Image (tube, helix red, strand yellow):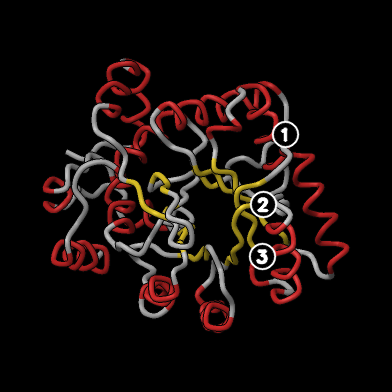
Amino acid sequence: MPVSRRAVIAAAALAPLARRAAFAAEPLIRRPIPSSGEILPAIGIGTSRRYEVEPTPDRIAPLKEAVQTFVSLGGTVIDTAPSYGTAEEVLGAILAETGLRQKIFLASKVDTTGRDETLKEFERSLKRLKVETLDLVAVHNLIDVTENLGVLRDLKAAKRIRYVGVTVWRDNQLDALEAVMKRESLDFIQVNYAIDNRAAAERVIPLAAERGMAVMTNVPFGRDRLFKAVQGKELPPVAKDLGCTSWPQVFLKYVLGNPAVTCPIPGMAKAAYVEDNLAAARGKLPDAAQRKQMEAFIDAV
């Protein structure tokens, strides 16, 4: 029988220490950033929507527990943006309270136009996040991409950020993303990619591998689209072969089965979700034949 998100939460409440010990016994899959060789755990946290809450102690508490659990299980990558409402402020409060900044690969974005405004936005992000530097800053949705990449490269040269990238999250942005990737030198791209949304795998993700760019992938659950599609359905036989016990693990293992993907960043607002999702970055990943089986199953529902 498949394990639902509700069942995962119940199991975590009953035996969190046993679950974490079992997860910790098997290391997270890790993948390199091509431009530097730095190694990252293969699943991160995305803060869009899930961390856009009122920054009060009671609203932050479950998110704080999620981040602490994430780090305790070997995760490092957390992605945010100034356009994600209060997410930067909330994440900044969590990092300040927990002292976990040095264990986090912290990524944010810029999405304004003009050098002065972009620099102001960057400084606001540092203030909200309560940090002095960022690991990665990307040009969000390719906004003023040439000018903003110039600003980010200056910040990188000044050692205020370590990596530079660009992001999109819709298929109708892929042609523009491909053009930028062909003309620019980038450390990272971030792109939408899921088992039922595979357009990025046709040209963009292979191009990233060819050009030596790390690939973060967003909306791996399709804004909950995939959960709705499989509601009430049994996990397919291939899930058992891969050691999956939940649909989120199936969806994430599919994405990670593409070797050019560095790090999916699903939203994770509860510790139980963190434990469930990070299990996808342990053990077996699907081979080409298994990925075809997974695609066929999802295409048929």
- Answer with mark 1 or mark 3, whichever residue precedes in sequence: 1
Residue that mark 2 sits on:
161
Name the disc covering residue 139, or none: 3
Q: Which residue is drawn at the image coordinates 46% and 62% (left, top)?
A: 214
Q: Give the secondary structure at mark 3.
A: strand
- Compared with 205, 120 (above or below) is above
Vertical order, 229 against 41 (above or below): below
Q: Which mark is residue 54?
A: 1
Tag 3: residue type?
Val
Q: Which amino acid does the dot numbered 1 rest on?
A: Glu
Number of other residues with Cα within 10 Å of mark 1, as a class: few under 14, some 14 to 19, many 20 or more:
some
Is the residue 66 above or below the residue 39 in the image?
Answer: above
Q: Position of residue 49 (x, y in %)?
A: 60, 47
Q: Amino acid at mark 2?
A: Ile
Left or right position of 48 against 204 = right
Quadrant the C terminus occupies:
bottom left
- Mark 1 or mark 3: which is in front? 3
Which residue is painted at 52% across and 82% down in the image?
182
Residue drawn at x 42%, y 56% is 220
Secondary structure, mark 1, is loop
> Viewed as shown, does residue 105 lie left or right of 16?
right
Q: Name the element at disc 2.
A: strand
Residue density around tag 3, few if under 14, some if 14–19, many if 20 or more, within 10 Å: many
Q: Nearer the viewer, residue 230 or 131?
A: 131
Position of 80 with respect to 160 (left or right) is left
Viewer-nearest residue: 279 or 59: 279
Q: Residue 257, image x and y in percent? A: 27, 59
Q: Residue at x 30, y 62 (%)?
A: 259
Q: Name the image quarter holding residue 18.
A: top left
Residue at the far right: name it.
Answer: 116
Query: Disc 3 to disc 2, how far (Cα)?
Result: 13 Å
